[in-house]
């Protein structure tokens, strides 16, 4: 595991929702805990090396998140094992994480339920193929949720930092 606290967002193709969530959380945490975290994303059917969609890049700019250099990657067991926290955009994404690594249950959450451990519930709708306005709505939904839960992320980062300092 990394010395930094690592968050993994999971969606289907890793070109819309999870890169937007990655950029949003990175921009929110940068002023709170610089150099103490890493945020990454992956797709359950994602291929390697694809950029975020043009509209995802544009939507992320709404709150100063730059995902223009994003490169998609597939969800793998190795990736799941290497992170501290996993947030799936839908229940099916959570299910796919747990099919890869059932022992990841304690660190895997449905995005909209975090920090509640209930793995079923409302997901974040996929904007792929829709208008820029729909991407903007999706990004703002993600950003506002993460902003409301920011203290939870900070607590987890601090707990890991404190544990490593005291080890």
Image (spheres, grey):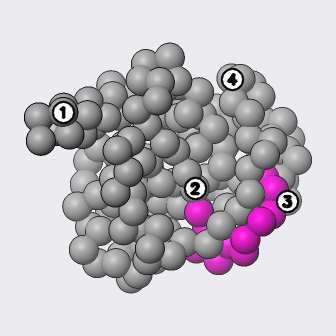
Callout in the foreground (1, 3): 1
Residue under label 3: 129
Left or right: 38 in relation to 105? right
Residue under label 2: 41
Residue at point 29%, 58% (across, down): 107
CA gap, disc 3 and disc 2? 20 Å
Q: Are marks 1 and 3 in contact (CB under 8 Å)?
A: no
Q: Is residue 155 above or below residue 122?
A: above
Residue under label 1: 165
Residue under label 4: 63
Q: Earlier in the sequence, mark 3 or mark 2?
A: 2
Q: Earlier in the sequence, mark 2 or mark 1?
A: 2
Is residue 159 shown to the viewer in this render?
Answer: no
Which residues fall within the magenta stretch? Answer: 42-52
Residue 13 or 139: which is nearer the viewer?
13
> Please, what secondary structure does the residue beneath circle 4 have?
helix
CA gap, disc 4 and disc 2? 19 Å
CA gap, disc 4 and disc 3? 22 Å
Q: Residues within 10 Å of mark 3 (few under 14, many from 20)?
A: few
Q: Is residue 17 above or below residue 63?
A: below
Callout in the foreground (4, 3): 4
Residue 44, given in percent of the width and then of the height, sits at 58, 73
Residue 35 or 154: which is nearer the viewer?
35
**Which quadrant is the N terminus positioned in?**
bottom left
Q: Are marks 4 and 3 in contact (CB under 8 Å)?
A: no
Left or right: 92 in relation to 73? left
Q: Residues within 10 Å of mark 2 (few under 14, many from 20)?
A: many
């Amino acid at each position: 595991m990394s010395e930094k606290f690592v968050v993994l967002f999971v969606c289907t193709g890793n070109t819309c929702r999870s890169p937007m969530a990655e950029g949003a959380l990175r921009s929110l945490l940068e002023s709170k805990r610089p150099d103490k975290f890493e945020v990454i994303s992956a797709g359950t059917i994602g291929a390697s090396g694809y950029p975020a969609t043009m509209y995802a890049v544009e939507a992320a700019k709404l709150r100063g998140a730059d995902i223009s250099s994003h490169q998609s990657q597939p969800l793998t067991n190795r990736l799941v094992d290497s992170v501290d926290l996993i947030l799936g955009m839908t229940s099916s994404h959570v299910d796919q994480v747990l099919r890869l690594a059932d022992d990841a249950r304690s660190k895997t959450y449905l995005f909209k339920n975090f920090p509640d451990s209930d793995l079923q519930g409302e997901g974040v709708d996929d904007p792929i193929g829709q208008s820029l306005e729909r991407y903007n709505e999706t990004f703002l939904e993600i950003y506002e949720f993460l902003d409301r839960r920011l203290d939870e992320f900070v607590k987890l980062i601090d707990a890991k930092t404190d544990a490593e300092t005291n080890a």
